[in-house]
Image (spheres, coloured by chain):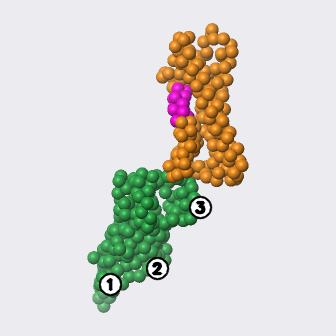
Chain colours: A green, B orange
Amino acid sequence: MKRILLGWVISLLFVGSAPAAETYQLDPGHTYVLWHISHFGFSNPSGKWYAKGTLILDETKPQDSKLDVTINTADIDTGIPKLDEHLKNKDFFDVARYPTATFVSHKIQMTGKETAKVFGTLSLHGVSKPVVLDVKLNKIGMSPIKNKKTARFSATTQLKRSDFDINAYLPGLGDEVKINIEAEANKN
Amino acid sequence: MLIKNTENHYGAMAILLHWGMALLIIGLLGEGLYMVNLPISLQKLKLFGWHKEYGVLVLILVCFRLGWRLTNSVPALPINLPKWQKIAARMAHWSFYVFMFAMPITGWLITSAAGLPVSFFGWITLPDLIVPNTDLRIFFTEIHQWLAYGLIAVICLHMGAAFKHHFINKDNVLRGMLP
């Protein structure tokens, strides 16, 4: 009897620890990185990039999840074509030389049931530095539009553009950049 | 060549500081004269930003250079040089130190008074020396401007004297500062 019970417990453990990691693709139509910066203290202009990438989501052990995101720096969108052009030139993102920016996670620390700190490396403008995202899971479920399992997240972070050698017009044009991220990922 | 100065030749450090800062300062003077006449534009703002950063670099370098100057002997001037010329040469040299401090500090005061702080190549933002004030901004701008004219005059005198020593007196004064 004892042996049967033990076997049952062990088999249960195995089921419980079955690999639950699933691979999702970030949906570039609903995934963006929105930044805000101080314009000489007068206003706080913003702009965004839509992003693509891969999320390996482990629902049972979310801390084992992985994230890899890429943006094309030339796709910057402020709604102001002249400003977009300025941001693409050598003063700022120098998109001819640095066409992409990436964020790759290397550690996830759960801070609540649906919140986590995602530690990773942001590579931007030829510089790679650690950045921490405060991420909140909004919803996991079937998307009624795509008929695919979909995960939705919101995230925030803050960084200094001088850390990435983007120094033009400092400090009037603020150094601190606030970032809001919205992400929607569809299971493959 | 030695790092430190000797009786008849400047050392490598003094030579590096002399020519490096000469380039930097003459560049800043030229850029400054050019940028102030531009109409307000992003380009002008960018040039002002560079002028401030490199100006701070001069201030940092001159602190080190003054320390180096005070802890080193300097090559002697030619023995047969008239006394007034010896005094004039040393006065010109020390006046450069006054300019090298006064130019960046008045520049810092202008930018503080204008409420446009200085970033040093994105590493740090300098604290403001005074609160924004239009009258003081104009006052320090004028001082900065006249100091620049004075500095240009002393540079011309210094270069003229160096060439006179080299080509007319045919002595070793200029050679003492060459690598």
Label 3 or label 1, whichever comes before in sequence order: 3
Circle 1 residue: A145
Q: Are labels 1 and 2 on one chain?
A: yes
Q: Nearer the viewer, residue A166 or A118?
A: A166
Inter-mark Cα distance, 1 to 2: 27 Å
Point 56% across, 54% down: residue: A171
Q: Secondary structure at mark 1?
A: loop
Let me know if residue B21 is in the magenta part.
yes
Label 2 or label 3, whichever comes before in sequence order: 3
Task: Identify the subunit bearing mark 2.
Answer: A
Inter-mark Cα distance, 3 to 1: 42 Å
Point 70% across, 44% down: residue: B139
Task: Identify the subunit bearing mark 1.
Answer: A
Q: Are marks 2 and 3 in contact (CB under 8 Å)?
A: no
Circle 3 residue: A41
The three-letter amino acid code for the residue at tag 2 is Lys
Single out the residue that lies furthest toward the top: B80
Q: Position of residue B61 (x, y in %)?
A: 57, 36
Q: Would you identify the image quadrant in which residue A13 lies?
A: bottom left
The three-letter amino acid code for the residue at tag 1 is Ile
Label 1 or label 2, whichever comes before in sequence order: 2
Estimate how packed mark 3 is, as few (under 14), some (14 to 19) or many (20 or more) residues with alpha carbons within 10 Å. few
Q: Are labels 2 and 3 on one chain?
A: yes
Point 63% across, 8% down: residue: B80
Q: Position of residue B82 (x, y in %)?
A: 66, 11
Chain part drawn in magenta: B14-27
Q: Secondary structure at mark 3?
A: loop
Say whether residue A144 is left or right of residue B77.
left
Q: Secondary structure at mark 2?
A: loop
Label at residue A113: 2
